[in-house]
Image: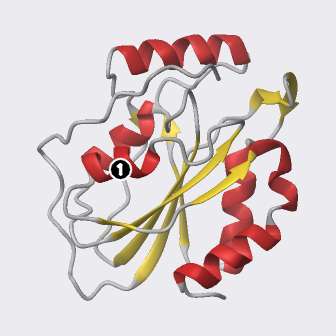
């Protein structure tokens, strides 16, 4: 995705009630897009999106529940069309609708927010997700796949859209290298002390 200035998200009201402070389980919430993707300057068609591959690798190592975030209006398979839509959504500070129910966070003390980096930040649907939930008292770890931007602005953006949460150590993996990310995941899990299987 092209690199344009990112705009911090603004928190919104109307969130579900906060969870019990005794919650200790981990939720891995993942948004991923298959189809035509950036690949070392070119394009490659993916049956499974890079972030979903990374989330599956994490879930095989980590004692967690996995929740898929899906857009009510799915993003196009065409890379250029998705880039254009994402720029429009960022410029409009949009909140794309999510398909299906949101998870109940009551039993979770830690939430991993996994998504790609599009135009230096997480897709706007991730802000839809965080703003609709009360993450007060939870630890939130950004998890990203990227082409050139690493974690991008996710730490700052999630701090804005998850007031009352602690933003923990993030994990960023280059999309083209995701299948070989096992050692990076293992090192990150050791750093964070998240519960291994």
From the image, which quarter does the C terminus lie in? bottom right
Asked which secondary structure carries label 1, the reply is helix
Assess disc 1: are there few (<14), some (14-19) or many (≥20) residues with their C-alpha within 10 Å of its C-alpha.
Answer: many
Q: Position of residue 119 (x, y in %)?
A: 55, 26
Residue drawn at (78%, 27%) of the image: 38
Does residue 187 appear left or right of residue 178 in this picture?
left
- On screen, residue 13 above or below 106: above
Q: In the image, 185: left or right of 106?
A: right
Q: Quadrant of residue 47?
A: top right
Task: Give the residue displayed 33% in from the left and 22% down from the top.
Answer: 94
Query: Could you tell me residue 152's position as x and y percent?
Result: 53, 41
Question: Residue at image x 75%, y 68%?
Answer: 184
In percent of width and height, residue 176 lies at 83, 43
Q: Circle 1 sits on which residue? A: 158
Residue 162 vs residue 150, the one in the foreground: 150
Question: Vertically, is 43 above or below 18?
Answer: above
The percent position of residue 1, horizontal first and vertical second, equals 65, 23
Residue 25 visible in the snapshot: yes
Judge left or right: residue 52 versus residue 128.
right
């Amino acid at each position: 995705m092209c690199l344009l200035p990112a705009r911090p998200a603004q928190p919104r009201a109307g969130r579900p009630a906060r969870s019990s402070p005794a919650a200790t389980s981990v939720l891995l919430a993942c948004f991923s897009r298959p189809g035509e993707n950036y690949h070392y300057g070119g394009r490659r068609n993916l049956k499974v999106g890079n972030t979903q591959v990374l989330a599956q690798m994490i879930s095989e190592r980590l004692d967690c529940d996995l929740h898929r975030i899906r857009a009510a209006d799915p993003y196009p398979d065409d890379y250029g069309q998705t880039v254009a839509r994402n720029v429009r959504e960022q410029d409009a500070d949009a909140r794309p609708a999510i398909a299906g129910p949101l998870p109940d966070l009551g039993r979770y003390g830690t939430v991993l927010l996994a998504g790609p980096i599009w135009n230096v930040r997480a897709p706007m649907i991730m802000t839809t997700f965080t703003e609709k939930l009360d993450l007060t008292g939870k630890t939130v770890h950004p998890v990203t796949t990227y082409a050139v931007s690493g974690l991008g602005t996710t730490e700052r953006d999630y701090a804005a859209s998850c007031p009352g949460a602690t933003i923990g150590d993030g994990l960023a993996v280059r999309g083209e290298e995701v299948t070989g990310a096992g050692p990076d995941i293992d090192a990150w899990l050791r750093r964070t002390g998240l519960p291994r299987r």
